[in-house]
Image (tube, rainbow, N blue to C red):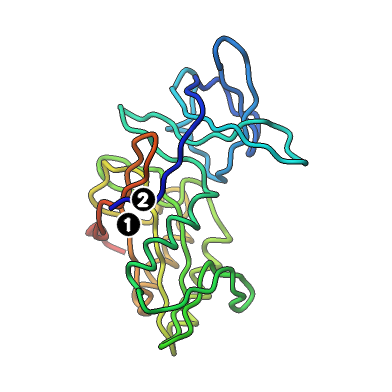
Amino acid sequence: MRVLSIVPDAKAVFVERTNRFLAFVNLDGKRVAVHVHDPGRLEELLYSDVPVLIKREQGKNRKTKWDLIASNYNGQWVLVNSKYHRYIAEKLLHMLFSDYELKPEVKLGASRIDFLVESPEKIAIEVKGCTLSREGIALFPDAPTKRGKRHLEELIKFARHNRAMLLILIFREDSRCFLPNADTDPEFAKTFWNAVKAGVEVYPALLSYNGHDVDYIGRIPLCMATH
């Protein structure tokens, strides 16, 4: 199912990432700065000489004229721009909750969650983007995330009297199942399994990006694991 179209303006070659938000690419022989709109480490996706897709952006306070959109991994484009997550999630959630009204960015406890459904029943929904996959196992996070752990704790509290959901947008189409990344963030992984036991619904949504369109492939299961 077609979810969103993201049309890049150019193909380039990755050079280096100098900080969390800034990287440089080789565009037609010129070193060009691009904005990285993803908090993850992305080490398996952003490295010297890997092909990337970039999109021209304009803004009054921007330091760069380009956004990084995707990186090529074994012949497949992997979306690495989290600003599109909300739009992708909205499309999927309208599919799941066709008669419900979604309210974005709602305060929940000490945090803000991505969406809240209030009618006919309350559902708190947090969205995470996943770009790491090893041997067919999609893994989140790829860097320690205290914020992610806090979101799960709020979902656990909410699930005591209402529905709560964790929607995981998986951009590695070679994934067959999902696991929390205990090697990178054991506290997040522990809280994730506590959330599952508390009734938080986990929806790992597998997506593909062909360099133009984002398509929803389907829901994949949690991997069998001891925890």
What is the quadrant of residue 20 in the picture? top right
The quarter of the image holding the C terminus is: bottom left
Residue 118 at x, y percent in the picture = 48, 84
Residue 109 at x, y percent in the picture = 61, 79
Q: Amino acid at mark 2?
A: Ile
- Residue drawn where x is 28% and y is 47% of the image: 137
- Residue drawn where x is 41% and y is 67% of the image: 166
Q: Residues within 10 Å of mark 1 (few under 14, many from 20)?
A: many
* 149 with respect to 133 (left or right): right
Question: Alpha-carbon distance for marks 1 and 2?
Answer: 6 Å
**Do labels 1 and 2 touch, CB within 8 Å?**
yes
Q: Residues within 10 Å of mark 2 (few under 14, many from 20)?
A: many
Residue 191 at x, y percent in the picture = 45, 67
Question: Secondary structure beneath disc 1?
Answer: strand
Foreground: 74 or 11? 11
What is the quadrant of residue 182 in the picture? bottom left
Q: Name the residue at the top extreme.
A: 29
* 40 with respect to 163 (left or right): right
Question: Secondary structure beneath disc 2?
Answer: strand
Q: Who comes first in sequence, dot 1 or dot 2?
A: 2
Tell me, for residue 86, which label it has, or none.
Answer: none
Residue marked by disc 2: 170
Q: Name the residue at the right extreme.
A: 61
Residue 31 at x, y percent in the picture = 63, 16
Tell me, for residue 205, which label it has, or none.
Answer: 1
Foreground: 26 or 181? 26
Count of picture labels:
2
Q: Amino acid at mark 1?
A: Ala
